[in-house]
Amino acid sequence: MSENDSTIQNSPEPNLLSGISVIELGDEISAAYCTKMMAYLGADVLKIERPLVGDSARSVGPFPDSAPNIEKSALFLYLNTGKKSITLNLESSSGQKIFKSLIEQADLVVENLPPGKLESLNLDYIHLSSINPDIVMTSVSDFGQTGPYKNYKATPLQHYAFGGLMYITGLPDREPLQMKPRLPEYGVAQNAFVASLSALWYRDSTGIGQHVDISTAEYSASILENGLSMYSYTGNKLGRSGNKGYGRAAWGIYTCKDGFVGVIAGPEHKWSAMAELMDEPRLADEKYTERSGRQIYAEEIETLMEPWLMSHNKQEIFEQAQKLGLAFAYVATPEDILNWEHLDNRGYFTEISHPNAGSYKYAGAAFQAEGIEPYWQRAPILGEHNDEVLLPIIENLKMDIQDLKLEKTI
């Protein structure tokens, strides 16, 4: 490997998922993020992309110098670290034949194609399990593989709406608001990650493969804080409260000297620490100690808090509050996160070089395991591993590689 092609790599052995063979039929986020976490833990992840164009994420920015390039998409590079890429047209009979050959040695397929797509190609779980009875397939879709909405499509905006998160986000006297990140797609990918590993454990325990059905709508409906239980138990709806949690003071986002901090003055027995932290004895008044009082006298409390908040920066507010057992935080910018000493100390970020896109910091997995080194490797170039993966199969199946290229099979 040339110096330009080099990446920061650790040996994938030993690792938590070493020896697990994963095939990804993913487009954009949900399947790709699921398998990214697997690759990080040593699984051999083979990403199958469409010839010439690849994963749709390759066309999504930002791009270095704002110049679109399928090998420089920040979204694609982040989602696909540690994987191999081959191109294969599953619409062609030759492509299907090659894919079925790949399935013979695979442990897991993770896909987020529209429900019914693989069935129309005779590549669904029923057909694949007839080739490899041990295979586990995880299917991620907007509404699941069954039900009246199974063929509907949805954007993150719609999932925020369907799942109820939009209903509780915003100011009480204004319209509901969307959250900015594509949380439903990343969240459902985490569900798919856990479910896939659970199905593999079940397979190893029983010898029976499994088809796992993951719905983004169900993920979105599962994270409505206590909104669903509140309505189920009391009939009351958890509404919008803006930056004031539950409509009371000292529970929400406040301005400080250099940005914003999250203030959570709880539990109840910790309220006296607020007066100590902010060097404001009046905050210890008995009428503020109960939650009801902090709702009734919210304006008074915030007037007392403001001078101290505006004279301190977010980092020192966070650290001083933590010393007193108060669950404060600060609203971090991307720059804050990339330069956060704590994450750097834990080795969460690392610099990875890509021959086309250059060298950038990448985030790791959401957990660490004792004695296990993560597997860092750059995202692949489109079809980079065609020769390595496909040539032996094409030769074994006695296919003509030139014909396959002319047919745009690979």
Image: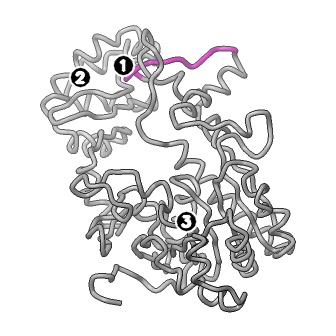
Residue name at image x 55 percent, y 47 percent = 187
Mark 1 → mark 2, Cα distance in angstroms: 10 Å
- Horizontal side of 357 relative to 109 (left or right) equals left
Find residue 53 and report its horizontal and vertical position in percent.
Answer: 48, 61
Q: Secondary structure at mark 3?
A: strand
Disc marking residue 49:
3
Residue name at image x 72 percent, y 48 percent = 115
Disc marking residue 295:
none
| Of pointers 1 and 2, the one earlier in the residue sequence | 1
Q: Which residues are magenta?
A: 235-244
Query: Label 2 is placed on what type of residue?
Result: Met
Q: Secondary structure at mark 1?
A: loop
Q: Are marks 3 and 1 in contact (CB under 8 Å)?
A: no
Find residue 127 and report its horizontal and vertical position in percent.
Answer: 84, 66
- Horizontal side of 102 relative to 282 (left or right) equals right
Q: Are marks 1 and 2 in contact (CB under 8 Å)?
A: yes
Choose between 233 and 271: the one closer to the eye: 233
Residue name at image x 55 percent, y 80 percent = 15
Question: Which quadrant is home to the C terminus?
Answer: bottom right
For the stretch drawn in magenta, what is the main secondary structure? loop
Q: Which quadrant holds residue 347?
A: bottom left
Mark 3 → mark 1, Cα distance in angstroms: 51 Å
Find residue 107 and report its horizontal and vertical position in percent.
Answer: 71, 74
Q: Which residue is mark 1?
A: 249
Disc marking residue 305:
2
